[in-house]
Amino acid sequence: MQKLFLKICLIMLISQGALCAKDYNASLFGIKSDGITLNTQSIQRAIDFISEKGGGKLKFYVGRYLTGSVQLKSNVSIELNEGAVLVGTTSIYDYMGINGTKALIMADGQQNIGVMGKGVIEGQGAGVIEQINKQIKKGYLEESMAQASPGLIAMKNCIGVNIEGFNLQNASGNFVTFSGCKQISIKGISIKNPATKEGKGLVFAQIDGLKLENLFIETAGAEIHSDGQSKNITIVNCKNASGKSLLMKN
């Protein structure tokens, strides 16, 4: 009887939201790993749901997940497990921006967020640029849009950000951009092969509290770029393709 009573209580607590899982499989939200289905709305729905439940981790497993821009919410992280590839769509119309900075994963004014794992974020940069140029030729976009190619991660005014462990490749713009953020940790990631000569690796503006550790960055533009107004920065064992240690460039 006591065991039955405890089981009933547990079911009631779960149904009332008092207990909730902290890890959520992406497939539970109808997110497809076929590399064809555009998952933007499904991924955003999952992030919103997890945030409303108090936070947790959205986990992606083996497969290719095509998406446009999604916005992280407070207390939510994305985990890309080994074999999982988050693929940016080539349509510029599927990207949103923060103050003109477009990216695949965005956040504005959020806390305790992150992207981690052993997977890959693939920007399809060459395809994005090709599609932008086609739209410009058809008269659907201004030529200035060619200079506003989307990056892979962009965050503004966020506190407590953890970026760790995965690979970023083939962005059409700057790979990772942070503005006005505090308490950022970027560890063990690899950034490779931008699609444009202007593309930078990590771009920072007005940051307070930043630790970069065990990074590999191979870009045609500056590997690490700062506006010169950031403070409390630590760089440990970060190298470029030539094996040289990386320093912050203003």
Image (spheres, grey):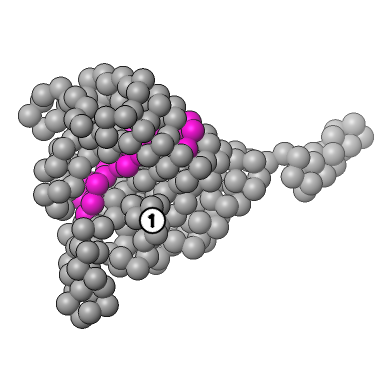
Judging depth in this view, the residue of 50 and 85 nearest the camera is 50
Judging depth in this view, the residue of 248 and 43 nearest the camera is 248
- Determine crowd level at label 1: few under 14, some 14-19, many 20+ residues with C-alpha closer than 10 A: some
On the image, which quarter does residue 235 sit in?
A: top left
Residue visible at 66% across and 45% down?
53
For this orientation, the residue located farthest to the left is 242
Q: Position of residue 213 (x, y in %)?
A: 29, 23
For this orientation, the residue located farthest to the front is 229
Residue visible at 53% across and 36% down?
111
Label 1, on which residue? 97
- Image height of 202 relative to 237, above or below: below
Q: Position of residue 196 (x, y in %)?
A: 14, 52
Judging depth in this view, the residue of 223 and 8 nearest the camera is 223
Residue visible at 47% across and 46% down?
108
Question: What is the span of residues highlighted in magenta in the rendered image?
Answer: 158-178
Image side of residue 41 versus residue 80, left or right: right
Image side of residue 107 versus residue 232, left or right: right
For this orientation, the residue located farthest to the right is 1
User: Which quadrant of the figure contains the C terminus?
Assistant: top left
User: Which quadrant of the figure contains the N terminus?
Assistant: top right
Q: Position of residue 17 (x, y in %)?
A: 74, 45
Q: Position of residue 79 (x, y in %)?
A: 44, 41
Residue visible at 51% across and 42% down?
109
Can see residue 250? Answer: yes
* Figure label count: 1
* Amino acid type shown at disc 1: Gly
Image side of residue 13 versus residue 219, left or right: right
- Image height of 236 relative to 165, above or below: above
Judging depth in this view, the residue of 213 and 209 nearest the camera is 209
Can see residue 124? Answer: no
Q: Secondary structure at mark 1?
A: strand
| Magenta stretch contains residue 221 | no
